[in-house]
Image (cartoon, rainbow, N blue to C red):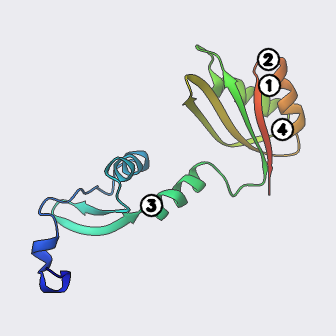
Amino acid sequence: DRVRDRTVGEIMTSHPVTTTPSSPIEDVARLLRDRKIGALPVVAGTRLVGIITESDVFRAFLEITGARERGVRVTFDVAAGDDVFVEVAAVAARHHMQVTSLLSVRHEDRRLAVVRLAGAGGDAFVDDVWRAGHRVLSVVRTA
C-alpha cells in the first residue's frame, strides 16, 4: 500500500492535537515535546488560523530570555523561601544594571535562578550574589 494511493482522509487523524492563539508558549512546548510532534495547528473556534512549529517555540524562548541582549547571564542556586526576584532587582539597581530576563527553574532537585543583565556592573553583581550566600554556577558574557 503506497502513500500516493491513499486519500488525505485515510492518512490524517480525525482528531488532531491543536492549540489556540491564547495558549501560553510553555503549554505549546510541552505539547510538542510530550506528543513528539514538530508542529501544531492553531485554531480559533473552528477556524484554522496558523501553524506553530518547534522553530517558533525556540524563537519565542530566545525573545523571552533576552538571549539577543548584550550583557551578562548569571546562573546561581536559590534556597527554599528566597524571593529571588526581589533580591535580583535590588542588586541590579545597586549596580545600575537592567534585568532583561529572570527565570527561576528546578534542576536536579534544586532551585536555580538564571538572570540576564544589561550594563557594565556584571562583576559587581556576581560578587554581591556570592556575598549573599548563593553559589554561582556560571557567568556568561553575551554579545
Name the residue beneath numbered marker 3: 54
Q: CA distance from mark 1 to mark 2?
A: 5 Å
Classify mark 1: helix, strand or loop.
Answer: helix
Q: Nearer the viewer, residue 20 or 98?
A: 20
Classify mark 3: helix, strand or loop.
Answer: helix
2 or 4: tag closer to the N-terminus: 4
Q: CA distance from mark 1 to mark 3?
A: 35 Å
Amino acid under label 4? His
Left or right, 17 with respect to 67, comes to left
User: Any mark on residue 132, and which?
Assistant: 2
As drawn, 126 above or below 19: above
Q: CA distance from mark 2 to mark 3?
A: 38 Å
> Considering the image in quadrants, where does the N terminus appear?
bottom left
Q: Are marks 1 and 2 in contact (CB under 8 Å)?
A: yes
Q: Nearer the viewer, mark 2 or mark 3?
A: 3
Amino acid under label 2? Ala
Name the residue beneath numbered marker 4: 96
> Considering the image in quadrants, where does the C terminus appear?
bottom right
> For residue 37, which quarter of the picture?
bottom left
Mark 4 surroundings within 10 Å by alpha-carbon count, few (fewer than 14), some (14 through 19), many (20 or more): some
Amino acid under label 3? Glu
As drawn, 68 above or below 31: below
User: Any mark on residue 129, and which?
Assistant: 1
2 or 3: tag closer to the N-terminus: 3
